[in-house]
Image (spheres, rainbow, N blue to C red):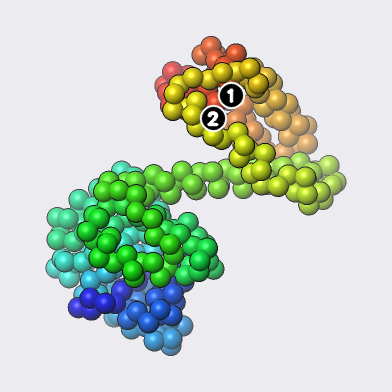
Amino acid sequence: MNTDGVTVIGMGPMGRAMARAFLAASRPTTVWNRTPGRADELVAAGAMRAATAAEAVAASELVVLSLTDYQAMYDILGATGDAIAGRVVVNLSSDTPDATRAAAAWLADRGAQLVAGGALASADVVGTDGASVLYSGSREAFDAHEATLAVIGRPEYLGADHGLAQLHYQAQLQVFLTTLAAYLQSFAMFTAAGIPAQEFLSRAAPGEDVAVLLPDAARAADEGRYPGELANVLMMGATADHVVGANRSAGLDTALPDAVKSLYDRAIARGHGRDGWASLVEVIRKPSSS
């Protein structure tokens, strides 16, 4: 077993990018993928190709997973037998916090430690100053391999609860995916009107108008107080209704604006009409009350 090197399992774009970064940093790197050919470029660059997942796990104390989800971890590592014992498994796959905690227990039963992670970077940014990666789990295991993990991106340790990295990661993805969808919805409105989408983008820099609202909204969510002097739910709800109408009249799919309007409708039904728009968090927290 190589205590200085690293094994990377999963040769999708992120897995290959991480393996390239480890090789560039002169870390002995073993790679494995169900489709062996995906690792050819890395093997040519100096990586060792493992013939089996068990051989890959046996090669290094540090095993980094870049897979579709945590079920893929079970499918692969479940067949490695005793080889997984004594390993630190850094799983950078996406899943839920609860799935991550269950995986930590599963690995512990097999003598391994889980450090869960979420990479806040695309494959082309991995290994550069612009990449950062969130981690949670065993502090001892994280500290032992922090220098190696820093190769793929700036590491940030969040705490011993294995689910913390996924909580932060999924919350970031939620903002990311919803924001992208909202922009595409707006692009569609413009193109339906025969206007280039770029004209909308030139007047709507992503996030600038929203960022100034977030500190007060976060404070309101923490305190459960929602002053509505500036923008209450009734006013914002009327706006949401107009957005739905504009999309519908353009013949567009309205699932996204309908979902937003639904939050305002339910907040009004619960008596939050005169409260600030951040009171929608109460609807999100207690959906059964709708």
Label number found at residue 277: 1
Question: Where 290 sits versus 203, above or below?
Answer: above
- Measuring from the top left, give residue 190's x and y in whole percent: 79, 44
- Would residue 74 be visible to someone looking at this image? no
Q: Is residue 222 left or right of residue 226?
A: left
Sequence-first disc among 1 and 2? 2
Residue lying at 58% horizontally and 31% vertically, measured from the top left: 259
Instruction: Examine the image and state in which quarter residue 238 appears.
Output: top right
Label 2: which secondary element: helix
Q: Nearer the viewer, residue 86 or 40?
A: 86
Instruction: Examine the image and state in which quarter residue 78 appears.
Output: bottom left
Q: Is residue 49 left or right of residue 285?
A: left
Number of residues whose C-alpha sits closer than 10 Å to that of mark 1, classed few (under 14), some (14–19) or many (20 or more): many
Check disc 2 and give the amino acid type. Answer: Ala
- Measuring from the top left, give residue 45's x and y in whole percent: 43, 86
Number of residues whose C-alpha sits closer than 10 Å to that of mark 2, classed few (under 14), some (14–19) or many (20 or more): some
Q: Label 1 vs label 2: CA separation?
A: 8 Å
Q: Nearer the viewer, mark 1 or mark 2?
A: 2
Q: Nearer the viewer, residue 25 or 194?
A: 25
Question: Where 105 sits versus 232, above or below?
Answer: below
Label number found at residue 217: 2
